[in-house]
Image (spheres, rainbow, N blue to C red):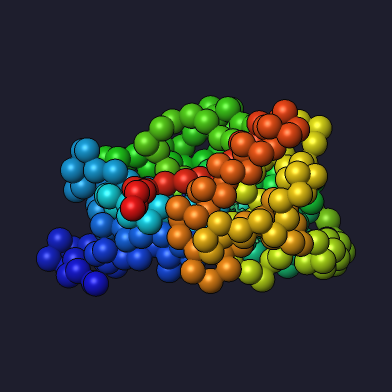
């Protein structure tokens, strides 16, 4: 349902009771009370600043690392898909990248402008803001080592520039400044041959397509790899490939992927996640931690 936002001078789009299944790569998730796509940064600032202080706010990229529970999200989801997506060339091989730019667009921009160091973004099916939040990485590259600074926005709609040093960065983990969200970042590349880089990435993506079920509804790797091992290897070694709960099934192609086989509920996926963790703990004595973010209210039927 679309709500009229013009009386408040908002230029973005406000949807009410928006099914999150439409906005996650798993195609799963109950409704968000409010779902706002800002027109631009000023509009976002205005919109956020008029929300009640206690409002639960969640920023959303392409939902490619997100499990939204079946009763959905109480509060407001800010979707950056189609918004804040500018990429600007600064001096010295540096780009200012909007949080709403897709990682694929950023990779293409680098190739076309002979910038090296951002090829790995071609392997991440999310927005740049999501990559910042996750410290996403692929093919040996990672987001934060090339970030110089970020612009954030807080609950009052106030923006701040912060250096990368102000965050604690680890494998798929970014800590610091709760209740501030990423609006853009200045990212440092080096100059080189963009065509050669693009070809190298194409080969890596072709290789990946052979080992991962990339065309099916999933969120990529569900679990982080434990130190010196692979979550997929451990899950496979427990004989769990193909194991199914409701509509959620462990991929036959890559054991760290859970596929929505058609009608999976978030509760099926969550039960399967718990089952995998318990089995790997019992049989291999390793604790697996989720990479995927789990949000929203459960339907405990
Ligand atoms: C087929 C497939 C393959 C994948 N391969 C990889 C891979 O190789 N490497 C890898 O790292 N990941 C991979 N992923 C996971 C996913 O693409 C990444 O984690 C990606 O960075 C998530 O981006 P997103 O825009 O979809 O974020 P979302 O899923 O929308 O959000 C993820 C988290 O980031 C937060 N967030 C989003 N935007 C912002 C913002 N602007 N400010 C603050 N917080 C924000 C959200 O609230 C949420 O907590 C894969 C996923 C799929 C489906």
Q: Relative to residue 263, is residue 36 depicted above or below? A: above
Location of residue 119 by image quarter: bottom right
- Residue at (17%, 70%) from the top-left corner? 4
Q: Relative to residue 140, is residue 87 depicted above or below? A: below
- Residue at (48%, 29%) from the top-left corner? 176
Residue 149 rendering spot, x and y as whole percentages: 56, 38
Does residue 200 appear anywhere in the picture?
yes
Location of residue 144 by image quarter: top right
Report the number of numbered marks: 0
User: 72 or 201, which is in the foreground?
Assistant: 72
In this rendering, position of residue 73 left or right of residue 281: left
Residue 261 rendering spot, x and y as whole percentages: 58, 68
The quadrant in which the N terminus is found is bottom left
- Residue at (32%, 61%) from the top-left corner? 31
User: 103 or 114, which is in the foreground?
Assistant: 103
Residue 179 rendering spot, x and y as whole percentages: 37, 36
- Residue at (49%, 34%) from the top-left corner? 162
């Amino acid at each position: 349902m679309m709500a009229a936002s013009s009386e408040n001078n908002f230029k973005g789009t406000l949807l009410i009771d928006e099914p999150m299944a439409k906005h996650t790569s798993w195609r799963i998730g109950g409704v968000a009370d409010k779902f706002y796509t800002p027109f631009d940064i000023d509009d976002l600032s205005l919109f956020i600043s008029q929300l009640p202080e206690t409002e639960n706010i969640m920023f959303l990229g392409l939902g490619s690392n997100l499990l939204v529970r079946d009763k959905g999200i109480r509060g407001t989801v800010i979707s950056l898909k189609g918004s804040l997506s500018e990429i600007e060339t600064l001096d010295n091989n540096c780009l200012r990248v909007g949080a709403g730019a897709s990682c694929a667009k950023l990779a293409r921009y680098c190739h076309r402008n002979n910038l090296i160091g951002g090829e790995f973004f071609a392997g991440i099916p999310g927005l740049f803001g999501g990559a910042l939040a996750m410290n996403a990485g692929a093919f040996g590259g990672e987001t934060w080592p090339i970030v110089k600074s970020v612009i954030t926005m807080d609950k009052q709609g106030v923006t701040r520039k912060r250096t990368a040093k102000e965050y604690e960065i680890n494998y798929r983990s970014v800590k610091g400044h709760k209740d501030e969200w990423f609006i853009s970042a200045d990212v440092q590349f080096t100059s080189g041959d963009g065509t050669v880089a693009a070809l190298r990435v194409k080969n890596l993506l072709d290789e990946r397509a052979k080992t991962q079920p990339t065309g099916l509804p999933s969120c990529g790797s569900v679990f982080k790899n434990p130190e010196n091992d692979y979550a997929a290897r451990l899950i496979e070694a427990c004989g769990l490939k193909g194991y199914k709960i409701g509509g959620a099934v462990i991929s036959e192609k890559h054991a760290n992927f859970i596929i929505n086989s058609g009608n999976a509920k978030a509760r099926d996926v969550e039960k399967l996640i718990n089952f995998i963790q318990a089995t790997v703990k019992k049989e291999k004595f390793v604790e697996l931690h989720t990479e995927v973010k789990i949000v929203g209210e459960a339907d405990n039927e």
